Image (cartoon, rainbow, N blue to C red):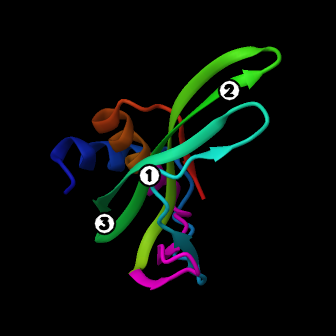
């Protein structure tokens, strides 16, 4: 739910960011696959939390993930990040061949909404690396 402060931020951003690009026309499938570790030659990553933020009447899905380069030849390190697939169009409406739920989401094009969502994630989750589809 937007706060008075969030509304002031939105108004300020609307003055400096380009006009709204409008809603796109194509939803994309999103497979809900929490706590599944994906490995590579140098490390791993996984998504560990999903949540919804409401903004301008839209239900926007975001996920939190973490990863580490723990087997790289040049050293090790890790990070936490947020991924924002987009506005939920159809929530968990089907399943993939492994039985995981699939939602239909539409990527967020509006730069103002992107910034409001990014700031919400930074404030509530303490994660500054936010990526949008």
Nearer-N-terminus badge (1/3) = 3
Q: Quadrant of the C terminus?
A: bottom right
In this view, the mark in front (2 or 3): 2
Cβ atoms under marks 1 and 2 closer than 8 Å:
no
Give the x, y percent position of residue 130.
52, 41
Q: Residue furthest right?
A: 73
Q: Is residue 58 above or below residue 5?
A: below
**Mark 2 vs mark 3, CA separation in Å:** 38 Å
In this view, the mark in front (1 or 2): 2
Taking the spot 36% from the left edge, 30% from the top edge, the residue there is 126
Give the x, y percent position of residue 120.
33, 43
**Magenta segment: does it hold 108?**
yes
Segment tinted magenta in the rendering: 92-114
Residue nearer the viewer, 59 or 51: 51
Q: Classify 10 Å Cα crowding around label 2: few (below 14), some (14-19), many (20 and above).
A: some
Cβ atoms under marks 1 and 3 closer than 8 Å:
no
- The residue that mark 2 highlights is 69
Q: Classify 10 Å Cα crowding around label 1: few (below 14), some (14-19), many (20 and above).
A: many
- The residue that mark 3 highlights is 56
Q: Does residue 127 appear to the left or right of 98 in the view shown?
A: left
Q: Is residue 88 above or below residue 45?
A: below
Give the x, y percent position of residue 42.
76, 31
**Magenta segment: does it hold 78?**
no
């Amino acid at each position: 739910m937007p706060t008075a402060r969030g509304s002031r931020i939105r108004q300020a951003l609307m003055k400096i960011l380009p006009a709204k690009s409008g809603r796109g026309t194509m939803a994309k499938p999103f497979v809900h696959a929490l706590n599944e570790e994906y490995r590579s030659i140098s490390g791993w990553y996984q998504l560990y939390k999903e949540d919804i933020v409401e903004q301008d009447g839209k239900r926007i899905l975001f996920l939190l993930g973490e990863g580490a380069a723990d087997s790289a030849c040049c050293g090790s390190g890790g990070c936490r990040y947020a991924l924002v697939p987009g506005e939920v169009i159809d929530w968990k409406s089907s399943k993939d061949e492994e039985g995981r739920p699939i939602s239909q989401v539409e990527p967020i094009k509006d730069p103002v909404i992107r910034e409001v969502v990014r700031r919400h994630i930074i404030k509530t989750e303490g994660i500054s690396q936010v990526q949008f589809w």
